[in-house]
Image (cartoon, rainbow, N blue to C red):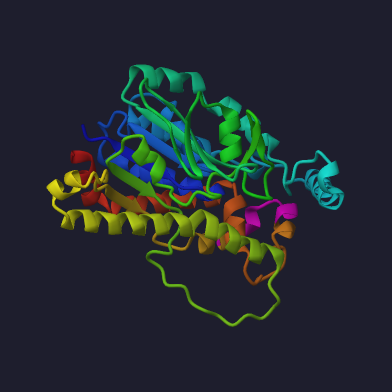
Amino acid sequence: MSRAGVVLTGGGARGAYQVGVFKAISDQLPDLHYPFPIICGSSAGAINAVGLGCSGDIFRHSVERLEALWSGLETAHVYRSDYWGMAKRMGHFLKAFLGGEDNEIPASMLDNSPLRDFLSTAMDLKRLKYNIDHSDIRAVCVTACGYKSGQSVSFFQAEHGVEGWHLGQRVGIQTELNVDHLMASSAIPTIFPPVKIHREYFGDGVVRNMAPLSPAIHLGADRILVIGVSANRVCTMTRRPAIDFPKLPQIMEHLLNGAFIDVVENDIDKALLVNQLLNLIPERTLEENNINLRPIEMLVISPSEPIDEIAARHVSTLPKPVRQFLGQNKPNPEGGASMASYLLFEGPFLKDLVALGYRDAQAHARQIETFFAN
C-alpha cells in the first residue's frame, strides 16, 4: 500500500513557513483526513510534526490550530529576551567556557525554558498515542543529535510492528514522544541548551543528520512531501563587496545555514539522482542482484523569496536586547538578518512566512493534486 510521508526541516522561526504550505493544501483539498501516515521533523519541524500528529482527524482543523499557535507567538514565549535573563545566561555561558568541565552549566547563549512551558500547554501528547492506535497515522518521528555519540537519532512513536534501524551514525528508536524530545530536537547549537534523554544529552536534529529523508523512508513512506525553509533552489545569490569585518552573528548564520539548509537540499538532489538511476535498471535485474532500493516520489515546496530579506524588514519587532545580541541595533547593518530569521518569533514576521508558504503551495496546486491522488 502506498504511504505518504512529510519531512519538515528545521530553522527556528522559519518553521512558520511550513504552516502556510499546510494551509494551502487544506484549502485546496478540504476533505483530507490524516493525509500523512508518516510525519517526520527536525528542530522547529519536529514541533510542527508532533503538532500535526496530536491533532484531530480533519486536516483542515489541525492546520488551523497550528496557525493559531504560530500567529500568537512572541519571542518571550520561546526564550528569555529581557536584559537580565540574557545577561544571566551569557554570564553562565562565559563561566562554562572558562571553567571547562568543572562546571555543570548549560552550554548555551539563551535560556529557552519558556518554550518548554509553551509546548507543555500546547501539545496534547496523549492524543498522539490515541491517533496512532486508532487512526491512520503510522508513525511520528523527531530527530535529534547525541552530543556524546555523535549519532543522529530519530525517536519515533509508531503503530505496533514498526521496527527501528541502526545504520552507522543514523539510528531509529521507537519510544513514546514527550516534550523533552521536542526541546532536544529544537535546541539550536550554542544558542539553546542540550537536553538529557535517557543516558545522553541531545541537541538540534539537523546536526550530523546527513540524510534528512531517511527516517521517512525507513518508516515506510514511498512518496514524500518535503517542505524546506530556504530559497536557495530558486533565488540566485549576489556577491557584494564587504565593508566591515564580519561580526559573530554573520559567521554564525552561515554555520546555521550550512546545517539547516544545505544538507536537506543535498539529500533531495541525491534522492532524485537515485530515482533516475533506478528507472534505468529493469526490475528483474534489481531482484536478481538483491538491490533493495525503490524510487521515491517527491514533492518539494520551498520559499520563493529569501527568508532573510523578509526577516530584515521585521528585525525592529525583536526585543532590543536581542537586536543588540544579533548586531541589528544600528541602521543598515551588514549581514545578520539570516541569523535573526531563526530567532525572530514575532507575529508580523511569522504571519508573513505563513502567507509566503501559502502562495508557494498554491503555485504547486497541480503537483499537490497529483501527490494526493495516489
- Residue in front for this viewpoint, 254 or 70: 254
- Outermost residue, front side: 289
Residue 31 location, x and y as percent?
Answer: 25, 31
Q: Position of residue 33 (x, y in %)?
A: 29, 28
Q: Is residue 135 visible?
A: yes
Q: Residue 344 location in percent, x, y? A: 60, 51
Rendered-image quadrant of the C terminus = top left
Q: Position of residue 119 (x, y in %)?
A: 58, 31
Up-down relation of residue 120 to residue 149 (above or below): above
Instruction: Tell me which secondary structure the magenta stretch mostly adopts.
Output: helix
Q: Is residue 343 left or right of residue 230?
A: right
- Rendering quarter of residue 116: top right
Q: How many marks?
A: 0
Q: Residue at x 38, y 64 (%)?
A: 233
Q: Pick whichever, 137 or 118, lies toward us.
A: 137
Q: Quadrant of the N terminus?
A: top left
In-front residue for pair 171/358: 171
Residue located at (68% from left, 70% from top)? 331
Residue 302 visible in this rendered orientation of the protein? no
Q: Is residue 176 magenta?
A: no
Extent of the magenta region: 313-322
**Residue name at image x 33 percent, y 27 percent:** 58
Residue at x 33%, y 21% (from the top left corner): 135
Residue 314 part of the magenta-drawn span: yes
